[in-house]
Amino acid sequence: MKRWKTKSGYEIIQILSGRSNVFLLTNKEKNILIDTSVSRLWNRLQHKLDILGINSIDYLILTHAHFDHAANANQIKKRYNALIIVQKEEAHYLLNGDNILPQGTTIFTRPIVNILGKRFFPRFRYEPCNYDLLVDSYLDLKNLGFNGYLMHTPGHTIGSMSLIVDDEIAIVGDCMFGVFKWSVFPPFAEDSEQMIKSWGKLLETNCSSFLPSHGTANNRLLVESDYKKRIKNYSV
């Protein structure tokens, strides 16, 4: 399991990788889980948490409510008594176990969505889950025991959000991808312009590493390069 340490001594552990990344943020007293992956990986997620000796999860942060991020939210809530934090625009989907159908952003993914998306996406429903705390544009995590905050970073979905830890590391959900060495641009998004402008918001932090839900960590230079190239197409 990959690990990152911040200046405050917090540890970020990548619990799951592959289908969707799941991260644990811990200060040794409190634990925050970020996303939950797909339902078929519940046993693996549980096993990895057991290996780490994690018996309690204080909070579950959902970067957004797609099935590959939120499918095990209710299991986490029931097993660990975790409080669920989600952005207010995603709350309806979480409560209903439903998905937002994003658009394809490339010449390859656009036809996939147009031809197959509406037929197959409804099949990706998941177990509904009640939330405990709604986020609007910003939530300081000081009261949760961490030097960090949640910020609204829409684009992939209208209610996507990112977690900034110690102003060093950003956990960004699907706002970015970490699959290609030359780009962080995701293959699916509701609003590409909004998403790229969210990169700009993330670059206003001092974060040097951006951890996506798919692929590996992106460094700041790559994010800056892709942002400068793509923002030219839009008015800032």
Image (cartoon, rainbow, N blue to C red):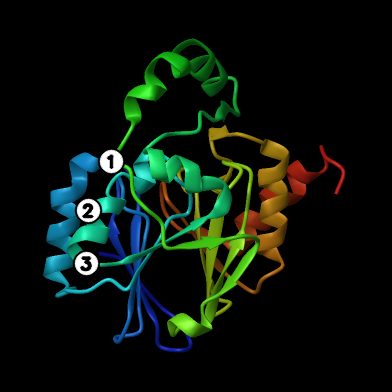
Q: Residue at x 59, y 20 (%)?
A: 107
Amino acid bearing label 2: Gln
Amino acid bearing label 1: Glu
Q: Secondary structure at mark 1?
A: loop
Q: Kindly identify which residue carries mark 2.
A: 75
Labels 2 and 3: the sequence-earlier one? 2
Check the image and name the residue furthest to the right: 235
Check the image and name the residue furthest to the top: 115
Q: Kindly identify which residue carries mark 3.
A: 80
Spot occupied by residue 176 in the image (x, y as percentages of width and height): 55, 48
Amino acid bearing label 3: Tyr
Labels 2 and 1: the sequence-earlier one? 2
Q: Is residue 27 above or below residue 135?
A: below
**Left or right: 180, with 18 as reference point:** right
For the residues labelled 2 and 1, say whether their Cβ atoms are less than 8 Å apart.
yes
Spot occupied by residue 170 in the image (x, y as percentages of width and height): 53, 66
Measured Cα–Cα span from mark 2 to mark 1: 9 Å
Q: Kindly identify which residue carries mark 1.
A: 127
